[in-house]
Amino acid sequence: MDRLKGKVAIVTGAAQGMGASHARVFIREGAKVVLTDLNEEKGQALAAELGENALFVKQNVTSESDWARVVSTTEERFGPVDVLVNNAGITMSKSLLDTSLEDYRRILDINQVSVFLGMKAVVPSMKKAGGGSIVNVSSINGLVGGAIGYTDSKFAVRGMTKAAALEVASSGIRVNSVHPGVIETPMIMQGDTKAAVEEFAKHIPLKRLAKSEEVSSLILFLASDESSYSTGSEFVVDGGITAQ
C-alpha cells in the first residue's frame, strides 16, 4: 500500500468520477494529493473524507494564474510536485455543422489548453523534486475518430504528450498519455443512456465496460517508479475496442 509513498501529486477534475477514483487510489498508496475542480462542494467533501494527506483547491484549469496558485499552494502544503494527472475534461457530441466556434474553442480550452498549462506549471516544481511523472488523460478518441472537437482535443493531448516527453526527459520527468474507452459511471448508467451503453458493451471484446478503478490502476502504475522507463507513450485501457 505504499507504491506512491513520499510522492506529492496534483489531480485535476478530482471532485467526482474518474478523478475522484484516481485521488482515492493515490491516497491509499501513500501519496499526498492536491485535488482540484470547479465543484467546490464535492471537492471539499472528498478531501475531508480522504484525510490529512488530501487538500482541495478550487481551480479553473484554463486559467494560467490558477495553475500558478495550485502549484504554489501544493509546494507550501506538501512540497515540490512529483506527479501531475491532467484528468479534467469535458465531452461534446455535436455534428460538425452544429458545432459553433464558441463550442469548439471551449472544448479545446478545457481538454487541450489546460494540459499545456498544467505541464508548463509543474515542470519547474518537478525539477526541484529531481524528476516526476505527468499523466495526461486522453481517450480512445485520441487514437481513432469520434465527435468533432472532442476527438481533435484528445488527439492533441496525445501529440503534446510526446513533444513534452522529449523536452523534459533529461530532467528525469516522464510524460505519458492514458486512453480510456467507455467507463461505467453513474452519469451514463441511468435513464435512456443506460440501455444504449449496455447494448454497446456487447460489441466490446471483453464484453463489458471498464470500472473507474481499472483506469486508476493504470494511472497509478505510470505515477509510480514502476514505470521508470516509460515516457512519451500511449497506454490504452479500452477492453479491446481499438484492436478491432
Image: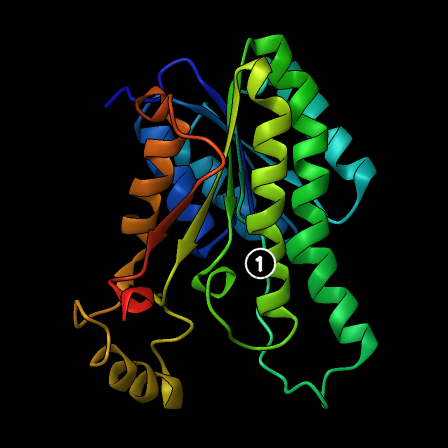
> At x 72% / y 90%, what residue is drawn?
97
> Which quadrant of the rendered structure holds the C terminus?
bottom left
- Single out the residue that lies furthest toward the left: 206
- Identified at 51% across, 54% down, the residue is 138
Which residue corresponds to mark 1? 155
In the rendered structure, the answer to whether residue 91 lies left or right of residue 186 reads right
**Residue drawn 55% across and 46% down?**
43
Query: Measured along the vertical axis of the image, is residue 75 above or below residue 130?
Result: below
Q: Residue at x 75, y 65 (%)?
A: 106
In the picture provided, is 7 more to the left or to the right than 62?
left
- Residue 51 visible here: yes
Picture coordinates of residue 199 (x, y %)? 26, 86
Could you say which quadrant of the image residue 86 lies in? top right
- In the rendered image, residue 47, in percent from the top left (x then y), is placed at 49, 37
Q: Quadrant of residue 4?
A: top left
| Amino acid type, mark 1 | Phe
Along the viewing direction, whichever of 116 and 22 lies nearer the viewer: 116
Is residue 73 in view from this perspective? no
In depth, the one of 116 and 214 nearer the eye is: 116
Identify the colour scheme used: rainbow
Residue 215 vs 208, above or below: the answer is above
User: Quadrant location of residue 151?
Assistant: bottom right
Dot 1: few (<14), some (14–19), or many (≥20) neighbours within 10 Å? Answer: many
User: Which image quarter is the N terminus in?
Assistant: top left
Question: SS at mark 1?
Answer: helix
Q: Nearer the viewer, residue 210 or 164?
A: 164
- Residue 33, percent across and down? 49, 29
Q: Is residue 82 above or below residue 244?
A: above
